[in-house]
Image (cartoon, rainbow, N blue to C red):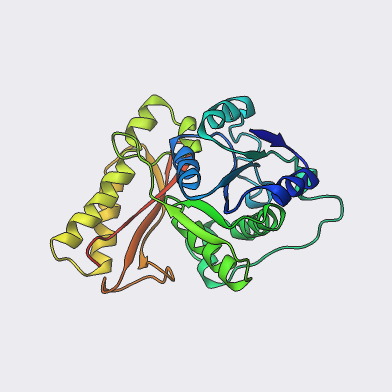
Amino acid sequence: MLVVGRVAQVREFVAKTPRPLGLVPTMGALHQGHLALVGAARRQCASVAVSIFVNPTQFGPNEDLTAYPRDMQRDLDLLAPLGVDLVFVPLVEEIYPEGFDTRVEVGQVARRLEGGQRPGHFRGVATVVTKLFNIVRPDMAYFGEKDAQQVRVVKRLARDLDTGVEIVVVPTVREADGLAMSSRNMYLSPAERSAASVLYRALCTAQRLYREGERDAGRIRQAVERVLGAEPLVVAVDYVSVADSETLDELERVDRPTVVSLAVRIGRTRLIDNIALSGV
């Protein structure tokens, strides 16, 4: 497993690596969700690259950039037995050198939900993903469905900018109680960690109502909000969305492929999750 920090070293590797090449972009603090992405890439590609980079441009001024968990040696130890060929671990100045002054903006799908709550977030995501695609030149790139809006933003970017990169979406990996695996879960106290299972329970409520025949998106949203509101450690619900699965336009009726997504604050930790409504 080759570990490098410079763009020139990545390009030297890419020039001679067998194809197809799969890329798994991460911000480190790896968990089983990330490892599932690596496993999918390993099964489908001749070569696998992983990037570990805590991207400062996708954090807002009051967000957790400095506190974001970092343990590079642990991450490398987790990747070593998985057949990863290259790990790209750049410093900030390697990705954003002195004088860097270009940003990538994705349109409507990036402006709602997380885009509305966290202005500039998806500009940062789109810019760093574009840079990684240009540096690594992968044939396929792997993203988790837990970050449902990010997946749609990256798909739009890849399509609109003719990157030639196939975006592969891997299902969310969950804990035994349904909590989606996330690097931010380690911020939770034991009591908060127990309470955090309410996100999945709320999503399952939406799915159950759909299966029972409910098609009114407003009633589904209200039911999800009631489940979340019954948990005392939920500090705030940033949004509950029942939206078109492709465009993320909010729906009045569930009459097409639909994704229910939410963002919830438990203590000081902000968690997101989503679920598709089956049968649509």
Q: Quadrant of residue 177?
A: top left
- Residue 155 relative to residue 240: left or right: right
Is 172 or 69 nearer to us in this picture? 172
x%, y% of residue 217?
Answer: 27, 68
x%, y% of residue 213?
Answer: 14, 66
Q: Residue furthest right?
A: 99
Examine the rendering and report whether any part of residue 229 can be seen.
no
Establish if 67 lies above or below 257. Answer: above
Quadrant location, the N terminus: top right
x%, y% of residue 85?
Answer: 61, 39
Write the residue at 66% across / 36% down. Answer: 66
x%, y% of residue 260?
Answer: 34, 59
| Total count of labels | 0
Q: Residue furthest left?
A: 212
Write the residue at 29% across / 33% down. Answer: 176
Examine the rendering and report whether any part of residue 58 can be seen.
yes
Is 133 or 96 nearer to us in this picture? 133
Write the residue at 47% across / 38% down. Answer: 35
- Residue 101 relative to residue 246: left or right: right
Quadrant location, the C terminus: bottom left
Establish if 209 lies above or below 201. Answer: below
Q: Quadrant of residue 234?
A: top left
Q: Quadrant of residue 154?
A: bottom right
